[in-house]
Image (cartoon, rainbow, N blue to C red):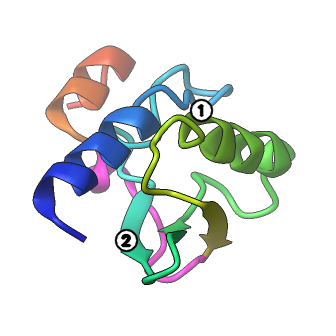
């Protein structure tokens, strides 16, 4: 996948807001990897802030919806992983400021 497409995907994923924290999943550092095969199937490897998050299904649906307007993407698979575990150091400076974390 070229860098422009990756930036476009990450920009679309910035529209997906974690409902509990009110900050997008990209700035929270929840998106770990993007892989797309030759048929246009994108696999988004990501985590959640807590294991057993009751809103996991909602976030997965929002990820898929956010990527529907990118023509290169024909299908989306969201792979939720727990390793490496998420921590506040993965957040961007923006997310830390928004959440009042030093």
Residue positioned 43% across, 83% down in the render: 38
Quadrant including the N terminus: bottom left
Q: Is any atom of residue 43 visible in this view?
A: no
Majority SS type along the magenta span: loop
Residue 62 in the figure: left or right of residue 102: right
- Give the Cα distance between marks 2 and 1: 18 Å
Tell me, yes or no, whether the highlighted magenta stretch contains residue 83: yes
- Helix, strand or loop under label 1: loop
Residue 78 locus on image (x, y percent): 64, 65
Residue 52 in the figure: left or right of residue 75: right
Quadrant including the C terminus: top left
Answer with the quarter of the image where residue 16 lies.
Answer: top right
Q: Which residue is mark 1?
A: 18
Determine which of the numbered discs, if any, sits on residue 82 in the image: none
Given residues 69 and 60, the one toward you in this image is: 69
Tell me, yes or no, whether the highlighted magenta stretch contains residue 3: no
Residue positioned 47% across, 26% down in the render: 15
Residue 79 locus on image (x, y percent): 63, 73
Q: Looking at the image, is 36 positioned above or below residue 89? A: below
Q: Which residue is mark 2?
A: 33
* Mark 1 neighbour class, 10 Å CA radius: few under 14, some 14 to 19, many 20 or more: many
**Residue span colored magenta:** 81-91
Mark 2 / mark 1, whichever is N-terminal? 1
């Amino acid at each position: 996948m070229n860098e422009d497409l990756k930036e476009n995907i990450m920009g679309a994923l910035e529209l997906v807001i974690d409902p509990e924290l009110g900050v997008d999943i990209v700035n929270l550092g929840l998106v770990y990897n993007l892989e797309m095969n030759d048929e246009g199937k994108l696999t988004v490897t990501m985590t959640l802030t807590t294991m057993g998050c009751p809103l996991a299904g909602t976030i997965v649906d929002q990820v898929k919806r956010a990527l529907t307007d990118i023509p290169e993407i024909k299908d989306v698979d969201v792979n939720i992983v727990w390793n490496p575990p998420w921590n506040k150091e993965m957040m961007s400076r923006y997310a830390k400021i928004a959440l009042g974390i030093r």
